[in-house]
Image (cartoon, grey):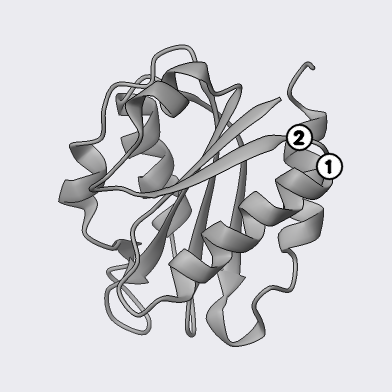
Amino acid sequence: MRVVVIYESLTGNTERAARVIAEEARLRGAEAAVYNVTRIGLADLARADIVFIGTWVDGFILFGHRPGRAGRLLSMPVIDRKKAAIFCTYAINPGDTLAKLQAVVEDRGAEVIARRAFRRGTLPEGIEAFVEHTLALVPA
């Protein structure tokens, strides 16, 4: 199985989560590549069986949550007919960031099959289960 992890990170937390996701995929026998959203390896993306896409939560503490730097995510290459798992990192409250990120990823042509928010202060908690669950949803 081939996995590509794409991330947008401001302070390094989402990048850290992306790298842990790739490592967990490798531990389960997958080939995994990690890319910043501004430098995606198109050949790897074309061959991927599953694409993990993550960002940080931008907005106010209690409202206005959205994917960080959504414009960069909107300019990703088209990923038609790919299965995707989305994730975000947050400090206090992810709000509806995952729903908004799902809309962006589906706009790029992917089918979102899993999603998860990770509190940045407890990383990598939850990533192992997220990867295991997601990979189980993708036919080998």
Q: What crowding class fits label 1: few (fewer than 14 Cα within 10 Å), some (14-19), or many (20 or more)? A: few
Give x and y (percent) for residue 40. Answer: 32, 39
Q: Specify the quadrant of the image occupied by residue 128.
A: bottom right
Q: Secondary structure at mark 2?
A: helix
State which tag comes first along the sequence, 1 or 2.
Answer: 1
- The percent position of residue 4, horizontal first and vertical second, equals 52, 37
Question: Residue at (60%, 69%) from the top-left corner?
Answer: 118
Q: Does any portion of residue 19 appear in the rendered image?
A: yes
The x and y percentages for residue 34 are 48, 48
Residue 15 falls in image quadrant: bottom left
Give 71 or 37, whichever is nearer the viewer.
37
Image height of 50 relative to 7, above or below: above
- Distance Cα–Cα, label 1 vs label 2: 9 Å
Q: Residue 85, relative to residue 87: is it above or below?
A: above
Give, as a three-letter code, the residue at label 2: Leu
Q: Which mark, by number, is residue 135?
A: 2
Q: Which mark is residue 92?
A: none
- Of tags 1 and 2, the one toward the viewer is 1
- Residue shown at 47% from the left, 83% from the top: 91
Q: Please state which amino acid type lies under the numbered disc 1.
A: Arg
Q: Residue at x 81, y 49 (%)?
A: 27
Q: Is residue 103 left or right of residue 125?
A: left
Q: Is residue 94 visible?
A: no
CB of mark 1 within 8 Å of CB of mark 2?
Answer: yes
Task: Please give left or right for residue 54 compared with residue 114 in the image.
Answer: left
Residue in the foreground of this view, choosing between 132 and 44? 44
Q: Where does the image place residue 32, in percent across and percent down from the top left?
A: 61, 40
Res 48 quadrant in image? top right
Q: Kindly identify which residue carries mark 1.
A: 28
Q: Quadrant of the C terminus?
A: top right
